[in-house]
Image: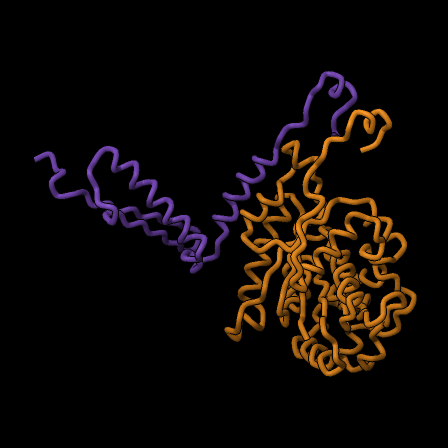
Chain colours: A purple, B orange
Amino acid sequence: MAGLSLFDRLLGRKPRATASIAKERLTMVLMRELPEGQANSPEESARLQQLQEEILAVVAKYYPVDADAIKVHLERKENVEILEVNITLNEHTGSG
Amino acid sequence: MRIVVVTSGKGGVGKTTTSAAFATGLALRGYKTAVIDFDVGLRNLDLIMGCERRVVYDFVNVIQGDAKLHQALIKDKRVESLYILPASQTKDKEALTETGVEAVMDELQQMGFDYVVCDSPAGIEHGALMAMMFADEAIVVTNPEVSSVRDSDRILGLLQSKTRRAIEGREPIKEHLLITRYNPKRVEEGEMLSYKDILELLRVPLIGVIPESEGVLHASNQGEPVILIKEDKAAQAYDDVVGRFLGENRPLRFTTYEKPGLLKRLLGGG
């Protein structure tokens, strides 16, 4: 418990649990630092697949959609990343 | 002959300590092993191995043709079949040419070495690239700390793109993650990334977790590879690493924190 004074210890203060912050920050930077052209690495594909499933699950709560009605595409150019999500709703869903 | 690079990107995470312990562990099991210091200009492996007073010729002398490889290789005094090739202190890193390094590797192969352990310098510059260039396997040394994890991620990218195996499209380098300076108590308290967190972030098979230990400093003070200090927990963890590397099944040790009992606390232990 280095870094805590005797005073802190007497008051029963605990060091801040900062490991979870570290993990969260690393998850973000490591995702962003994937080099160009590696957008379809196995990790990236798995992540996009999961994103796709989650988005579809949310949309499906409001509109009937087919499981294959969604297309997610991530493009990376220099400093720009474009996430394209395309969902086709069922034909009978239209309000008319 | 298998070439293993010990690398990390970040400095001070335990590359040289690991190279020394790992090479010694392989030699202890009877494999003819050479450990090479690629940190030209900042040599330290000789100090960690305790042979600093026996350095006459170095890696750069061999590459530049000023000495023969067998003249520069230092035979370890403790462990049979262990040899050290020190770095130069005076030359700069550019002195390590790709063809020169390749020639040394070829000669080591002809001399009947089983393993060559390449102790990489920190950074992602020429010296680090030369250390990984001819590797068959890589031990990526990482501390449970944000900058180290990020740098390891960079190094993994280089292993997959800048090495001979990558360039020639051969089977990729076999990567191993080694976490050092691990403190289970701080992990338990949520102050330190757990080895599971790091594994999840870097997605490289784990070869071991070395606990933070006083033995490491004692060992380097005396110029003794830590693996030889048998009672030390870091030494035992390194021995497990060598075992796993050779295909043995060794469960992880020293990764969980056990609260000291009341008596131990009263006596000032733990």
**Residue displayed at 84% across by 61% down:** B49
Q: Is residue B265 visible?
A: yes
The residue furthest top is: A11
The residue furthest right is: B53
**Residue displayed at 53% across by 75% down:** B168
Could you say where residue B126 lies in the image, as x and y percent from the top left? 65, 66
Q: Is residue B160 above or below residue B98?
A: above
- Where, quadrant-wise, is the C terminus of chain B in this rendering? top right
Q: Is residue B9 visible?
A: no
Q: Quadrant of residue B245?
A: bottom right
Could you say where residue B25 lies in the image, as x and y percent from the top left? 77, 62
Q: Is residue A8 above or below residue B69?
A: above
- Between B217 and B174, the residue placed more toward the observer is B174
Q: Is residue A67 left or right of residue B60?
A: left
Q: Is residue B4 left or right of residue A50?
A: right
Q: Quadrant of residue B89?
A: bottom right
- Where, quadrant-wise, is the N terminus of chain B in this rendering? bottom right
Could you say where residue B205 lies in the image, as x and y percent from the top left? 58, 55
**Residue displayed at 72% across by 67% down:** B117
Q: Is residue B162 left or right of residue A69?
A: right
The residue furthest left is: A96
- Between A48 and B199, the residue placed more toward the observer is B199
Could you say where residue B154 lies in the image, as x and y percent from the top left? 57, 55
- Between B209 and B216, the residue placed more toward the observer is B209
Q: Is residue A22 left or right of residue A14?
A: left
**Residue displayed at 84% across by 63% down:** B46
Q: Is residue B59 above or below residue B206?
A: below
